[in-house]
Image: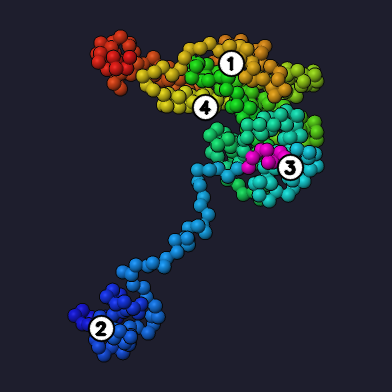
C-alpha cells in the first residue's frame, strides 16, 4: 500500500566491501530478513551477489564466449567446387550415376549425381573441364523465374531448387530432369562467360540484343546436344523431358534432321537447325531481349554521364563465330552469322514494351548531360554552361 515501509525490494549496498551486501527498505521487525556479518539485513534466499563498483582484476581475457560460437557470413554462398566433385566421379559409368540418383540424401549428393551424369556426355565432359579450369563452384538455391544464375564475383553457378527439400526433389522425375537441363545450361553459360574477347561496352545496344539472342539460342542448342549424347549412352529420360517442354520444337527438328543425315550430329549442321528454330518462338526472343536491355541499363547506370559508354564498333564475323564455337572447336555458326545480323527473322523486335525500352536507351546515348541537364546538341550545352563544359574538357 502506498505510504508504508513494508516493501520487499532488495537493493545492492554499494558501500559495503563484502559480497553479501544487501539492504532492505523495510521495518526492523521484518521476519523475512536476517543480519549479515556487517550488520546489514540480508535475505536467506540469496547466497551470492556482486559488487559492480569492484575493479575485477582477476578476469581472464582469454576466455570469451564468442569464440565458442560459429559465425555465418551471409554474403558467401554455400557451394562445392567442380574440381572436388569431378575428382570423385570422373570414372563413373551410367550405373554408378543411377546409384547416386537413388541414394540422394542432401544437396551435395545431388551435385555429385548431376555432375557424374553430365560427365558421361563428351560435350558435357568438356564443359565440366572448362568449369574446373576456371575454379568454378556450384550450389543449389531458390531462384525466382530463372533456372540458373552465375555469380561472377565468387565463381559460383547456382541451380534453382524450386524451394523443394532434397527428399521431395529426389521423388520428382520432372524436377530432377529440370535440374539436369539447368545444370547443362549453366556450364555452357560459364564457357561463354570466360571468353573475354567481346566487351558489350564496345558495341551499340542493338548489337547487344542480337548477341544475347544468340547466346540464349546457343545455350539451348548445346543442351539438346548433351541430352542426345546421354540418350546414346542409355539415359533417355532426359530427352523425353525436353520433348515435353517448351523447347520441344527444337528437339523434334533436331531429331528429324538427324534421321535424314546421321552425320549432321558430328559436323554441327543438326545443331545449327536447332539454333535457328529457337528464333521461331516470340516468347523466347522477348525474354532474351529483356535480359539484354537490363544489361544495357546496368552499363548506363554504372558509367560516367559525361562520357560515352557504348561505342559503335562493328562486330567482326570471325570473332563472333569463334565466340560461339563448340567445346571441341567447331565453328558451327560461321555460315549463318551474316544472315543473323541482317535478316528480320533473327533481328526483328515484336514486343512493344521492349521496343520502347530500347528507344529510351538510344535516346540516353544521344543526350549530352551538363550539370545534370540533358542536351541533344553539345554545342548548345557549351553555350549555356561554358564554365562547366570547360571543366569537363
Circle nearer the N terminus (3, 4): 3
Magenta region: 80-88
Task: Determine the image quadrant of residue 230.
Answer: top right
Q: Residues within 10 Å of mark 1 (few under 14, many from 20)?
A: some
User: Which of the numbered marks, if any, corresponds to residue 26?
Assistant: 2
Cα separation between marks 1 and 2: 93 Å
Circle nearer the N terminus (4, 2): 2
Q: Which residue is at the front of the view, 383 or 110? A: 383
- For marks 1 and 2, give the one nearer the viewer: 2
- Residue 155 locus on image (x, y percent): 58, 35
For the point 27% across and 75% down, which residue is it? 15
Helix or strand or loop: what does disc 3 sit on?
Answer: helix
Name above or below for residue 262 compared with residue 33.
Answer: above
**Contact (CB < 8 A) between labels 3 and 2?**
no
Quarter of the picture containing the N terminus is: bottom left
Name above or below for residue 54 compared with residue 122.
Answer: below
Instruction: Find disc 3 in the rendering and name its residue.
Output: 88
Instruction: Find disc 1 in the rendering and name its residue.
Output: 346
Instruction: Find disc 4 in the rendering and name its residue.
Output: 291
Circle nearer the N terminus (1, 2): 2
- Residue 90 locus on image (x, y percent): 75, 38
**Contact (CB < 8 A) between labels 1 and 2?**
no
Name above or below for residue 247 compared with residue 205.
Answer: below
User: Which of the numbered marks, if any, corresponds to residue 40?
Assistant: none
Amino acid at each position: 500500500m502506498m505510504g508504508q515501509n513494508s516493501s520487499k525490494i532488495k537493493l545492492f549496498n554499494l558501500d559495503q566491501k563484502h559480497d553479501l551486501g544487501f539492504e532492505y527498505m523495510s521495518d526492523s521487525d521484518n521476519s523475512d530478513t536476517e543480519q549479515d556479518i556487517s550488520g546489514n539485513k540480508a535475505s536467506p534466499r540469496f547466497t551470492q551477489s556482486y559488487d559492480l563498483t569492484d575493479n575485477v582484476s582477476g578476469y581472464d581475457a582469454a576466455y570469451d564466449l564468442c569464440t565458442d560460437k560459429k559465425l555465418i557470413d551471409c554474403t558467401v554462398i554455400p557451394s562445392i567446387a567442380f574440381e572436388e566433385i569431378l575428382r570423385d566421379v570422373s570414372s563413373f559409368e551410367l550405373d554408378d550415376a543411377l546409384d547416386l540418383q537413388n541414394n540422394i540424401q542432401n544437396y551435395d549428393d545431388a551435385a555429385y549425381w548431376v555432375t557424374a551424369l553430365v560427365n558421361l556426355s563428351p560435350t558435357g565432359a568438356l564443359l565440366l573441364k572448362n568449369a574446373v579450369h576456371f575454379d568454378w563452384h556450384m550450389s543449389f538455391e531458390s531462384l525466382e523465374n530463372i533456372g540458373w544464375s552465375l555469380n561472377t564475383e565468387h565463381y559460383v553457378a547456382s541451380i534453382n531448387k524450386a524451394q523443394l527439400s532434397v527428399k521431395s526433389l529426389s521423388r520428382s522425375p520432372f524436377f530432377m530432369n529440370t535440374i539436369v537441363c539447368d545444370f547443362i545450361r549453366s556450364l555452357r553459360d560459364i564457357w561463354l562467360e570466360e571468353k573475354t574477347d567481346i566487351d558489350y561496352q564496345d558495341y551499340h545496344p542493338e548489337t547487344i540484343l542480337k548477341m544475347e539472342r544468340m547466346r540464349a539460342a546457343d545455350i539451348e542448342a548445346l543442351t539438346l546436344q548433351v541430352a542426345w549424347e546421354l540418350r546414346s549412352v542409355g539415359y533417355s529420360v532426359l530427352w523425353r523431358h525436353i520433348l515435353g517442354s517448351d523447347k520441344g520444337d527444337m528437339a523434334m527438328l533436331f531429331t528429324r534432321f538427324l534421321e535424314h543425315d546421321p552425320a549432321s550430329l558430328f559436323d554441327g549442321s543438326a545443331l545449327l537447325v536447332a539454333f535457328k528454330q529457337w528464333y521461331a518462338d516470340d516468347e523466347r526472343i522477348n525474354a532474351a531481349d529483356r535480359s539484354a536491355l537490363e544489361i544495357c541499363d546496368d552499363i548506363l547506370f554504372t558509367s560516367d554521364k559525361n562520357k560515352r559508354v557504348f561505342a559503335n564498333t562493328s562486330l567482326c564475323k570471325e570473332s563472333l563465330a569463334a565466340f560461339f564455337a563448340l567445346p571441341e572447336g567447331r565453328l558451327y555458326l560461321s555460315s549463318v552469322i551474316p544472315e543473323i545480323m541482317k535478316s528480320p527473322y533473327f533481328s526483328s523486335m515484336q514486343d512493344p514494351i521492349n521496343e520502347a525500352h530500347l528507344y529510351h536507351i538510344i535516346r540516353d546515348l544521344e543526350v549530352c548531360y551538363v550539370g545534370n541537364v540533358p542536351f541533344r546538341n553539345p554545342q548548345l550545352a557549351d553555350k549555356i554552361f561554358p564554365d562547366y563544359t570547360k571543366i569537363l574538357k
